[in-house]
Image (cartoon, rainbow, N blue to C red):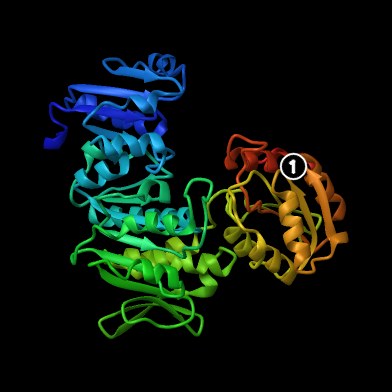
Amino acid sequence: MLPDYLVDTRIGIIGFGINNRELTKWLQKHGASEIVVYDQNPEIAKTLFELNFSGVEIVQGQDAFTKIDVEVAFRSPGIALHDPQIAAAIKRGVRFSSQTELFLELCPAQTVGVTGTKGKTTTSTLIDLILSEHSKVVGSKTYLAGNIGSDPFVFLDDLSPNDFVVLELSSFQLDQIRQSPHVAVVLDISVDHLDYHPDVEHYRQAKQGITQSQTENDYVVINLNSSTAVDLASSTQAQKVYFSNNESVDFGSGVIDGGIYWYQGHQAEQVLKVNDIKLRGQHNLDNVLAAIAACKLFKVDSVLIKEVVRGFTGYPQRLEKIVQRNGVSWYNDSASTNPITTIAAVKSFLEPMIVIVGGSSKNADFNQLGAELAAVNIKALITIGETGPEISLAAQSHHFPGDKIVAAKTLPIAIDQAYELSDPGDVVVLSPASASFDQFPNAKARGRQFNQLVFEKLGLDVAK
Protein backbone atom coordinates (compact mmCIF):
# COMPACT_ATOMS: atom_id res chain seq x y z
CA MET A 1 0.00 0.00 0.00
CA LEU A 2 1.04 3.58 -0.56
CA PRO A 3 2.23 5.57 2.44
CA ASP A 4 -0.24 8.28 3.46
CA TYR A 5 1.93 11.08 2.07
CA LEU A 6 1.72 9.55 -1.43
CA VAL A 7 -2.06 9.07 -1.47
CA ASP A 8 -3.84 11.59 -3.75
CA THR A 9 -0.44 13.25 -4.29
CA ARG A 10 1.13 14.58 -7.46
CA ILE A 11 4.32 12.47 -7.69
CA GLY A 12 7.37 13.29 -9.79
CA ILE A 13 9.81 10.77 -11.28
CA ILE A 14 13.04 12.70 -11.82
CA GLY A 15 15.01 10.88 -14.49
CA PHE A 16 13.43 7.81 -16.08
CA GLY A 17 16.49 5.58 -15.75
CA ILE A 18 16.59 1.90 -14.84
CA ASN A 19 16.27 2.69 -11.11
CA ASN A 20 12.96 4.51 -11.47
CA ARG A 21 11.10 2.26 -13.91
CA GLU A 22 10.08 -0.51 -11.52
CA LEU A 23 9.30 2.15 -8.92
CA THR A 24 6.92 3.82 -11.35
CA LYS A 25 5.21 0.49 -12.08
CA TRP A 26 4.86 -0.16 -8.34
CA LEU A 27 3.38 3.28 -7.68
CA GLN A 28 0.84 2.79 -10.45
CA LYS A 29 -0.04 -0.71 -9.22
CA HIS A 30 -0.70 0.64 -5.74
CA GLY A 31 -2.97 3.45 -6.81
CA ALA A 32 -0.82 6.55 -7.28
CA SER A 33 -3.27 8.97 -8.83
CA GLU A 34 -0.94 11.36 -10.66
CA ILE A 35 2.61 10.66 -11.84
CA VAL A 36 4.80 13.05 -13.84
CA VAL A 37 8.02 11.87 -15.48
CA TYR A 38 10.70 14.58 -15.84
CA ASP A 39 13.66 13.71 -18.04
CA GLN A 40 16.20 15.80 -19.95
CA ASN A 41 16.19 13.29 -22.79
CA PRO A 42 14.10 14.94 -25.54
CA GLU A 43 12.89 11.51 -26.69
CA ILE A 44 12.00 9.96 -23.33
CA ALA A 45 8.32 9.79 -24.37
CA LYS A 46 9.35 7.31 -27.06
CA THR A 47 11.09 5.18 -24.42
CA LEU A 48 7.98 5.12 -22.23
CA PHE A 49 5.88 4.10 -25.21
CA GLU A 50 8.30 1.29 -26.13
CA LEU A 51 8.21 0.04 -22.53
CA ASN A 52 4.40 0.09 -22.50
CA PHE A 53 4.10 2.79 -19.85
CA SER A 54 0.84 4.69 -19.91
CA GLY A 55 -1.13 6.97 -17.62
CA VAL A 56 1.80 9.24 -16.80
CA GLU A 57 2.42 12.86 -17.72
CA ILE A 58 5.75 13.50 -19.46
CA VAL A 59 7.94 16.60 -19.29
CA GLN A 60 11.04 16.16 -21.45
CA GLY A 61 13.92 18.19 -22.82
CA GLN A 62 16.98 20.04 -21.53
CA ASP A 63 14.92 22.34 -19.30
CA ALA A 64 12.69 19.58 -17.87
CA PHE A 65 14.03 19.92 -14.31
CA THR A 66 13.22 23.62 -14.24
CA LYS A 67 9.53 22.68 -14.58
CA ILE A 68 9.24 20.32 -11.59
CA ASP A 69 5.79 20.98 -10.16
CA VAL A 70 4.88 18.14 -7.79
CA GLU A 71 4.58 17.55 -4.06
CA VAL A 72 6.93 14.55 -3.81
CA ALA A 73 9.72 13.68 -6.26
CA PHE A 74 11.76 10.49 -6.59
CA ARG A 75 15.16 11.24 -8.16
CA SER A 76 17.35 8.86 -10.08
CA PRO A 77 20.64 8.27 -8.15
CA GLY A 78 22.70 9.91 -10.89
CA ILE A 79 20.89 13.24 -10.43
CA ALA A 80 22.51 15.17 -7.59
CA LEU A 81 20.48 16.98 -4.96
CA HIS A 82 22.96 19.88 -5.21
CA ASP A 83 22.21 20.31 -8.92
CA PRO A 84 20.99 23.94 -9.23
CA GLN A 85 17.69 22.95 -10.84
CA ILE A 86 16.97 20.32 -8.19
CA ALA A 87 18.05 22.69 -5.39
CA ALA A 88 15.62 25.28 -6.78
CA ALA A 89 12.79 22.75 -6.70
CA ILE A 90 13.63 21.89 -3.09
CA LYS A 91 13.51 25.61 -2.25
CA ARG A 92 10.03 25.74 -3.82
CA GLY A 93 8.89 23.10 -1.32
CA VAL A 94 9.19 19.87 -3.33
CA ARG A 95 9.95 16.91 -1.05
CA PHE A 96 12.69 14.79 -2.66
CA SER A 97 12.99 11.09 -1.98
CA SER A 98 14.44 8.12 -3.84
CA GLN A 99 13.76 4.53 -4.74
CA THR A 100 16.14 3.36 -2.00
CA GLU A 101 14.59 5.54 0.69
CA LEU A 102 11.03 4.43 -0.10
CA PHE A 103 12.05 0.78 -0.23
CA LEU A 104 13.72 0.95 3.20
CA GLU A 105 10.64 2.72 4.57
CA LEU A 106 8.27 0.00 3.33
CA CYS A 107 10.42 -3.16 3.52
CA PRO A 108 9.12 -5.66 6.10
CA ALA A 109 12.19 -7.91 5.79
CA GLN A 110 15.53 -7.74 7.60
CA THR A 111 17.83 -5.43 5.63
CA VAL A 112 21.61 -5.33 5.29
CA GLY A 113 23.13 -2.31 3.55
CA VAL A 114 26.77 -2.25 2.41
CA THR A 115 28.76 0.86 1.52
CA GLY A 116 32.40 1.92 1.18
CA THR A 117 34.78 3.21 -1.46
CA LYS A 118 35.87 -0.28 -2.45
CA GLY A 119 34.64 -3.80 -1.73
CA LYS A 120 30.90 -3.13 -1.79
CA THR A 121 30.06 -5.61 -4.51
CA THR A 122 32.27 -8.43 -3.22
CA THR A 123 30.99 -8.00 0.35
CA SER A 124 27.34 -7.70 -0.69
CA THR A 125 27.60 -10.76 -2.92
CA LEU A 126 29.22 -12.84 -0.20
CA ILE A 127 26.62 -11.80 2.40
CA ASP A 128 23.89 -12.71 -0.09
CA LEU A 129 25.43 -16.14 -0.74
CA ILE A 130 25.76 -16.90 2.98
CA LEU A 131 22.26 -15.70 3.88
CA SER A 132 20.80 -17.57 0.89
CA GLU A 133 22.21 -20.83 2.28
CA HIS A 134 21.00 -19.88 5.76
CA SER A 135 17.54 -19.16 4.33
CA LYS A 136 17.31 -22.74 3.05
CA VAL A 137 17.79 -23.91 6.64
CA VAL A 138 15.34 -21.54 8.34
CA GLY A 139 12.69 -21.43 5.60
CA SER A 140 13.07 -17.83 4.42
CA LYS A 141 14.27 -16.08 1.25
CA THR A 142 17.20 -13.78 0.51
CA TYR A 143 17.30 -11.05 -2.13
CA LEU A 144 20.23 -9.02 -3.49
CA ALA A 145 19.51 -5.48 -4.72
CA GLY A 146 20.82 -1.93 -4.87
CA ASN A 147 23.67 -1.48 -7.36
CA ILE A 148 23.57 -5.21 -8.18
CA GLY A 149 20.99 -7.97 -8.21
CA SER A 150 17.28 -7.31 -8.75
CA ASP A 151 15.37 -4.06 -8.59
CA PRO A 152 13.87 -4.02 -5.06
CA PHE A 153 10.44 -2.94 -6.29
CA VAL A 154 10.19 -6.17 -8.28
CA PHE A 155 10.03 -8.26 -5.09
CA LEU A 156 8.88 -5.78 -2.42
CA ASP A 157 5.30 -7.11 -2.35
CA ASP A 158 6.56 -10.70 -1.87
CA LEU A 159 8.64 -10.02 1.24
CA SER A 160 7.92 -11.31 4.73
CA PRO A 161 9.51 -10.34 8.09
CA ASN A 162 11.63 -13.52 8.02
CA ASP A 163 13.26 -12.71 4.69
CA PHE A 164 16.59 -10.94 4.11
CA VAL A 165 17.43 -8.16 1.67
CA VAL A 166 21.08 -7.26 0.97
CA LEU A 167 21.60 -3.83 -0.59
CA GLU A 168 24.81 -2.54 -2.16
CA LEU A 169 24.54 1.23 -1.64
CA SER A 170 26.57 3.98 -3.31
CA SER A 171 27.03 7.56 -2.16
CA PHE A 172 24.53 8.57 -4.87
CA GLN A 173 21.84 6.42 -3.25
CA LEU A 174 22.68 7.45 0.30
CA ASP A 175 22.90 11.21 -0.19
CA GLN A 176 20.57 12.83 2.41
CA ILE A 177 18.55 9.64 2.77
CA ARG A 178 16.05 9.53 5.66
CA GLN A 179 15.95 5.74 6.13
CA SER A 180 18.73 3.32 7.07
CA PRO A 181 19.04 -0.48 6.95
CA HIS A 182 18.78 -2.69 10.04
CA VAL A 183 22.42 -3.75 9.60
CA ALA A 184 24.73 -1.16 8.02
CA VAL A 185 28.13 -2.40 6.84
CA VAL A 186 30.71 0.39 6.51
CA LEU A 187 33.87 -0.65 4.69
CA ASP A 188 36.93 1.55 4.19
CA ILE A 189 36.02 5.03 2.95
CA SER A 190 38.50 7.19 1.08
CA VAL A 191 37.72 9.39 -1.95
CA ASP A 192 35.70 8.79 -5.10
CA HIS A 193 33.13 10.34 -7.46
CA LEU A 194 34.48 13.89 -7.28
CA ASP A 195 32.91 14.35 -10.72
CA TYR A 196 29.56 14.10 -8.87
CA HIS A 197 30.24 15.38 -5.36
CA PRO A 198 31.53 18.97 -5.02
CA ASP A 199 34.24 17.95 -2.53
CA VAL A 200 35.55 15.13 -0.34
CA GLU A 201 33.51 16.17 2.69
CA HIS A 202 30.28 16.06 0.68
CA TYR A 203 31.13 12.53 -0.48
CA ARG A 204 31.72 11.35 3.08
CA GLN A 205 28.58 13.07 4.38
CA ALA A 206 26.55 11.32 1.69
CA LYS A 207 27.86 7.96 2.91
CA GLN A 208 26.60 8.81 6.41
CA GLY A 209 23.04 8.20 5.25
CA ILE A 210 23.57 4.48 5.83
CA THR A 211 23.72 4.99 9.62
CA GLN A 212 22.10 8.29 10.49
CA SER A 213 18.53 6.95 10.82
CA GLN A 214 19.47 3.81 12.72
CA THR A 215 18.15 3.18 16.25
CA GLU A 216 19.51 1.32 19.25
CA ASN A 217 17.82 -1.83 17.85
CA ASP A 218 20.01 -1.70 14.73
CA TYR A 219 23.65 -2.61 14.08
CA VAL A 220 26.54 -0.98 12.27
CA VAL A 221 29.46 -3.17 11.17
CA ILE A 222 32.60 -1.03 11.03
CA ASN A 223 36.09 -1.47 9.63
CA LEU A 224 38.16 -0.86 12.76
CA ASN A 225 41.26 -0.26 10.62
CA SER A 226 39.62 2.67 8.79
CA SER A 227 39.56 5.89 10.80
CA THR A 228 37.08 7.41 8.34
CA ALA A 229 34.68 4.48 8.73
CA VAL A 230 34.96 4.70 12.52
CA ASP A 231 34.29 8.45 12.42
CA LEU A 232 31.32 8.01 10.10
CA ALA A 233 29.68 5.55 12.49
CA SER A 234 30.48 7.51 15.65
CA SER A 235 27.19 9.41 15.79
CA THR A 236 24.80 6.52 15.15
CA GLN A 237 22.56 5.13 17.88
CA ALA A 238 23.05 1.61 16.50
CA GLN A 239 25.03 -1.08 18.30
CA LYS A 240 28.62 -1.09 17.00
CA VAL A 241 30.14 -4.28 15.61
CA TYR A 242 33.76 -4.20 14.45
CA PHE A 243 36.00 -6.16 12.11
CA SER A 244 39.79 -6.05 11.94
CA ASN A 245 42.34 -7.89 9.84
CA ASN A 246 45.07 -7.79 12.49
CA GLU A 247 43.53 -8.07 15.97
CA SER A 248 40.68 -9.36 18.08
CA VAL A 249 37.65 -7.19 18.85
CA ASP A 250 35.13 -7.04 21.69
CA PHE A 251 32.14 -7.59 19.39
CA GLY A 252 32.64 -8.64 15.78
CA SER A 253 35.18 -10.51 13.65
CA GLY A 254 38.96 -10.43 13.88
CA VAL A 255 42.15 -12.24 12.91
CA ILE A 256 44.63 -13.81 15.30
CA ASP A 257 47.48 -16.15 14.24
CA GLY A 258 45.92 -16.93 10.87
CA GLY A 259 42.50 -17.72 12.30
CA ILE A 260 39.32 -15.73 11.71
CA TYR A 261 37.19 -15.49 14.85
CA TRP A 262 33.73 -14.26 15.83
CA TYR A 263 33.80 -12.44 19.16
CA GLN A 264 30.68 -11.88 21.25
CA GLY A 265 30.03 -11.78 24.97
CA HIS A 266 33.63 -12.56 25.99
CA GLN A 267 33.60 -15.68 23.82
CA ALA A 268 35.65 -16.38 20.71
CA GLU A 269 34.63 -18.87 18.03
CA GLN A 270 36.92 -19.74 15.14
CA VAL A 271 34.94 -19.54 11.91
CA LEU A 272 37.68 -20.39 9.41
CA LYS A 273 41.32 -19.73 8.59
CA VAL A 274 42.73 -16.94 6.46
CA ASN A 275 44.14 -19.62 4.14
CA ASP A 276 40.59 -20.83 3.43
CA ILE A 277 39.92 -17.63 1.46
CA LYS A 278 40.50 -18.00 -2.29
CA LEU A 279 40.34 -14.26 -3.02
CA ARG A 280 43.65 -12.43 -3.43
CA GLY A 281 44.59 -9.32 -1.47
CA GLN A 282 44.31 -7.87 2.02
CA HIS A 283 41.27 -5.86 0.94
CA ASN A 284 39.40 -9.09 0.23
CA LEU A 285 40.21 -10.36 3.71
CA ASP A 286 38.45 -7.23 4.98
CA ASN A 287 35.47 -8.00 2.75
CA VAL A 288 35.21 -11.52 4.16
CA LEU A 289 35.48 -10.27 7.74
CA ALA A 290 32.71 -7.75 7.11
CA ALA A 291 30.46 -10.43 5.62
CA ILE A 292 31.08 -12.77 8.54
CA ALA A 293 30.24 -10.06 11.07
CA ALA A 294 27.01 -9.13 9.29
CA CYS A 295 25.85 -12.73 8.95
CA LYS A 296 26.71 -13.77 12.51
CA LEU A 297 24.30 -11.06 13.73
CA PHE A 298 21.56 -13.26 12.24
CA LYS A 299 22.94 -16.31 14.07
CA VAL A 300 24.19 -18.02 10.90
CA ASP A 301 26.06 -21.26 11.64
CA SER A 302 29.84 -20.94 11.33
CA VAL A 303 30.16 -24.23 9.45
CA LEU A 304 27.83 -22.89 6.77
CA ILE A 305 29.81 -19.62 6.56
CA LYS A 306 33.05 -21.56 6.15
CA GLU A 307 31.62 -23.66 3.33
CA VAL A 308 30.39 -20.62 1.41
CA VAL A 309 33.60 -18.60 1.87
CA ARG A 310 35.81 -21.50 0.81
CA GLY A 311 33.82 -21.86 -2.40
CA PHE A 312 33.71 -18.13 -3.22
CA THR A 313 36.11 -17.11 -5.98
CA GLY A 314 34.95 -13.51 -6.33
CA TYR A 315 32.76 -11.32 -8.49
CA PRO A 316 33.41 -10.94 -12.23
CA GLN A 317 35.81 -8.15 -13.20
CA ARG A 318 36.97 -7.59 -9.63
CA LEU A 319 40.52 -8.90 -9.66
CA GLU A 320 39.15 -11.90 -11.55
CA LYS A 321 41.67 -14.38 -12.89
CA ILE A 322 40.40 -15.11 -16.39
CA VAL A 323 43.13 -17.37 -17.76
CA GLN A 324 46.66 -18.68 -17.28
CA ARG A 325 48.59 -19.48 -20.44
CA ASN A 326 52.29 -20.07 -21.09
CA GLY A 327 53.01 -19.32 -17.45
CA VAL A 328 51.34 -15.88 -17.59
CA SER A 329 48.22 -15.15 -15.51
CA TRP A 330 45.72 -12.56 -16.79
CA TYR A 331 43.46 -10.67 -14.35
CA ASN A 332 40.42 -8.57 -15.12
CA ASP A 333 39.89 -5.76 -12.61
CA SER A 334 37.88 -3.45 -14.86
CA ALA A 335 35.57 -2.64 -11.93
CA SER A 336 38.43 -0.70 -10.33
CA THR A 337 37.29 2.77 -11.35
CA ASN A 338 39.22 4.77 -8.74
CA PRO A 339 42.84 4.91 -7.51
CA ILE A 340 42.10 3.25 -4.16
CA THR A 341 40.83 0.01 -5.70
CA THR A 342 43.75 -0.13 -8.10
CA ILE A 343 46.16 0.34 -5.19
CA ALA A 344 44.52 -2.64 -3.50
CA ALA A 345 44.87 -4.65 -6.71
CA VAL A 346 48.57 -4.06 -7.28
CA LYS A 347 49.34 -4.75 -3.61
CA SER A 348 47.76 -8.20 -4.01
CA PHE A 349 50.66 -9.63 -6.06
CA LEU A 350 54.29 -10.44 -5.36
CA GLU A 351 54.88 -11.68 -8.93
CA PRO A 352 56.20 -9.30 -11.61
CA MET A 353 53.21 -7.32 -12.92
CA ILE A 354 52.25 -5.73 -16.20
CA VAL A 355 49.53 -3.28 -15.23
CA ILE A 356 47.10 -1.58 -17.62
CA VAL A 357 45.71 1.70 -16.24
CA GLY A 358 43.69 4.65 -17.48
CA GLY A 359 40.24 5.64 -18.69
CA SER A 360 37.91 8.61 -18.29
CA SER A 361 38.33 11.18 -15.54
CA LYS A 362 36.44 11.37 -12.23
CA ASN A 363 38.66 14.24 -11.04
CA ALA A 364 40.63 11.81 -8.91
CA ASP A 365 44.03 12.54 -7.37
CA PHE A 366 46.55 9.97 -8.64
CA ASN A 367 49.43 10.96 -6.36
CA GLN A 368 48.97 8.09 -3.89
CA LEU A 369 48.51 5.63 -6.74
CA GLY A 370 51.73 6.88 -8.31
CA ALA A 371 53.61 6.21 -5.06
CA GLU A 372 52.22 2.68 -4.80
CA LEU A 373 53.00 1.89 -8.44
CA ALA A 374 56.59 2.88 -7.77
CA ALA A 375 56.75 0.72 -4.63
CA VAL A 376 55.45 -2.63 -5.93
CA ASN A 377 56.89 -5.16 -8.38
CA ILE A 378 55.74 -3.68 -11.70
CA LYS A 379 57.58 -4.84 -14.80
CA ALA A 380 55.66 -2.52 -17.15
CA LEU A 381 52.95 0.12 -16.78
CA ILE A 382 50.72 0.41 -19.85
CA THR A 383 48.50 3.50 -20.02
CA ILE A 384 45.31 4.06 -21.98
CA GLY A 385 42.53 6.64 -22.17
CA GLU A 386 42.18 10.22 -20.95
CA THR A 387 43.79 9.63 -17.57
CA GLY A 388 46.69 7.52 -18.85
CA PRO A 389 49.09 10.48 -19.08
CA GLU A 390 48.08 11.72 -15.59
CA ILE A 391 48.80 8.33 -14.04
CA SER A 392 52.09 8.12 -15.92
CA LEU A 393 53.19 11.51 -14.54
CA ALA A 394 52.08 10.56 -11.02
CA ALA A 395 54.14 7.36 -11.14
CA GLN A 396 57.22 9.11 -12.52
CA SER A 397 56.96 11.80 -9.83
CA HIS A 398 57.65 8.97 -7.37
CA HIS A 399 60.62 7.75 -9.46
CA PHE A 400 58.88 5.01 -11.40
CA PRO A 401 61.20 4.48 -14.42
CA GLY A 402 59.91 6.19 -17.52
CA ASP A 403 61.31 3.45 -19.76
CA LYS A 404 58.89 0.98 -18.11
CA ILE A 405 55.86 3.03 -19.20
CA VAL A 406 54.09 2.29 -22.49
CA ALA A 407 51.50 4.78 -23.80
CA ALA A 408 49.10 2.47 -25.62
CA LYS A 409 46.07 4.81 -25.73
CA THR A 410 43.53 2.03 -26.46
CA LEU A 411 42.83 -1.36 -24.88
CA PRO A 412 43.55 -3.46 -28.01
CA ILE A 413 47.00 -1.88 -28.31
CA ALA A 414 47.54 -2.41 -24.57
CA ILE A 415 46.78 -6.14 -24.88
CA ASP A 416 49.24 -6.47 -27.76
CA GLN A 417 51.93 -4.71 -25.73
CA ALA A 418 51.24 -6.76 -22.60
CA TYR A 419 51.48 -9.99 -24.57
CA GLU A 420 54.84 -8.99 -26.09
CA LEU A 421 56.29 -7.91 -22.75
CA SER A 422 55.11 -10.86 -20.62
CA ASP A 423 57.23 -13.84 -19.60
CA PRO A 424 56.39 -17.02 -17.64
CA GLY A 425 55.74 -16.13 -14.01
CA ASP A 426 54.30 -12.69 -14.81
CA VAL A 427 50.78 -11.45 -14.17
CA VAL A 428 48.93 -9.03 -16.44
CA VAL A 429 46.33 -6.91 -14.66
CA LEU A 430 43.75 -4.55 -16.13
CA SER A 431 43.03 -2.20 -13.21
CA PRO A 432 42.20 1.20 -14.72
CA ALA A 433 41.82 3.42 -11.61
CA SER A 434 39.43 5.38 -13.81
CA ALA A 435 35.93 5.32 -15.24
CA SER A 436 35.38 3.95 -18.74
CA PHE A 437 33.25 6.52 -20.53
CA ASP A 438 35.99 7.86 -22.82
CA GLN A 439 36.05 4.61 -24.82
CA PHE A 440 33.31 2.35 -23.42
CA PRO A 441 29.67 2.69 -22.32
CA ASN A 442 30.54 1.29 -18.87
CA ALA A 443 33.17 -0.66 -16.92
CA LYS A 444 31.48 -3.99 -17.68
CA ALA A 445 31.79 -3.39 -21.41
CA ARG A 446 35.46 -2.56 -20.92
CA GLY A 447 35.94 -5.78 -18.98
CA ARG A 448 34.14 -7.86 -21.60
CA GLN A 449 36.37 -6.45 -24.34
CA PHE A 450 39.45 -7.20 -22.22
CA ASN A 451 38.41 -10.85 -21.87
CA GLN A 452 37.68 -11.15 -25.57
CA LEU A 453 40.94 -9.54 -26.66
CA VAL A 454 43.02 -11.67 -24.28
CA PHE A 455 41.43 -14.94 -25.36
CA GLU A 456 41.78 -14.04 -29.03
CA LYS A 457 45.43 -13.10 -28.51
CA LEU A 458 46.09 -16.43 -26.80
CA GLY A 459 44.27 -18.37 -29.53
CA LEU A 460 41.61 -19.64 -27.14
CA ASP A 461 37.83 -19.75 -27.31
CA VAL A 462 36.41 -16.39 -26.26
CA ALA A 463 35.82 -16.07 -22.51
CA LYS A 464 32.24 -16.41 -21.32
Q: Disc 1 designates what residue?
A: 411
Q: Which quadrant of the view contains residue 137?
A: bottom left
Residue at image coords 16%, 28%: 9
Q: Nearer the viewer, residue 269 or 366?
A: 366
- 310 left or right of 354? left
Q: Is residue 118 left or right of residue 22?
A: right
Residue at the image point whose x is 35% and y is 70% from the top = 302
Q: Position of residue 234 (x, y in %)?
A: 32, 71
**76 with respect to 8 (left or right):** right
Give, as a three-letter code, the residue at label 1: Leu
Determine whether 43 is above or below 377 in the image.
above
Question: Of residues 259 and 438, which is closer to you in this image?
Answer: 438
Q: Nearer the viewer, residue 65 or 313?
A: 65
- Residue at image x 18%, y 65%? 217
Residue 288 pos. (x, y %): 45, 66
Residue 78 in percent (x, y) is at 44, 39
